[in-house]
Amino acid sequence: MIKFKKYIPSKVKHFIKSKLGIANRKADRGDYFHLKKIARYEKTKVLLNGVQITIADSASFLFMHKEIFDQQIYKFKTNNPNPYIIDGGANIGLATIFFKQLYPNSEIIAFEPDAALVDVLESNVKSFGFRDVAIIPKGLWDKNEKLKFKSDGADAGILENLNSNGTPTSVVEVTSLKPFLNKKVDFLKLDIEGAETIVLRDIADALIHVERIFVEYHSFEGQKQTLNEIIDILSKAHFRLYMSIPGNNALKSPFMGLVKYNDMDFQLNIFGFKDNTNG
């Protein structure tokens, strides 16, 4: 078979690749190779889809980039040209950036309680020049109050109420999500390090307005698991569910012992989309 691509002018090749996103992905992979040699929790600059951003931690960035941009776990279709998206647990903004590039006219509200990450989040959103992105420097909870918080400088900051191990590093504001669910929500992302069950209990009645939901469930060693409650809440809200196990939690022989990470013995990605046959 003749390989026609060798006869295509380089400028045309680059144009085609840029449209497909191939050029940027290849450039990014080359730019990220050195990150594996960088110590954790050190801020550095990288290119993301041709734009320079700041990352707070190399290891967590590589993991999030793989899920969000390579695997595209948050990709969705909608006929709404201006989708309303809530990014709960925005971290340094990778999901927000993905959503905004997927739907440039979307309205996004991004919640992040870790002060060390909020500055990076704001800088990264500004680097892309996005509009209609509101960054709220608060955690999600079932009420408005202030709680002790333990930051790790990466992707595992957690409210002390959820895990008493370790020493709190700050006090953060938390808020109920209910006031933000008073209209149709095209996509709700909740990656909030163990607060997901408390938040879902609080917003159960408001999930009628949510079309799609992503929840990362966190199971803490020595604590009662609440996965059944999450599934019950989502099912009663007429979501049809799909689940997958992220990262190193996909064990081949779990009876031989669970892998503990940040005091968690299990994590699960839960994807929900409205299905009238489910209710």
Image: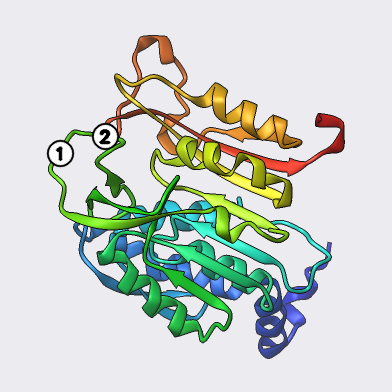
| Residue 13: quadrant of the picture | bottom right
Farthest residue toward the left?
Answer: 167
Secondary element at tag 1: loop
Q: Badges 1 and 2: C-beta atoms under 8 Å apart?
A: yes
The correct choice, above or below, for 12 with respect to 246 in the image is: below
Residue at x 66%, y 34% (from the top left corner)? 234
Relative image position of residue 119 (x, y in whole percent): 31, 74
Crowd rating for badge 1 (residues with CA inside 10 Å; few <14, some 14–19, many 20+): few
What's the amino acid at mark 1? Gly
Relative image position of residue 64 (x, y in whole percent): 45, 54
The correct choice, above or below, for 22 with respect to 63 in the image is: below
Relative image position of residue 110 (x, y in whole percent): 49, 65
- Is residue 36 at all visible to an observer of this figure? no
- Is residue 18 at all visible to an observer of this figure? yes
Q: In this view, does 265 lie to the left or right of 210?
A: left
Q: Which of 128 and 82 is in front in this view?
A: 82
What's the amino acid at mark 2? Asn
Residue at x 67%, y 69% (from the top left corner)? 102
For disc 2, the marked residue is: 163
Quadrant of the rendering where the N terminus is positioned: bottom right
For disc 1, the marked residue is: 166
**Which colour assignment does the render follow?**
rainbow
- The count of marks equals 2
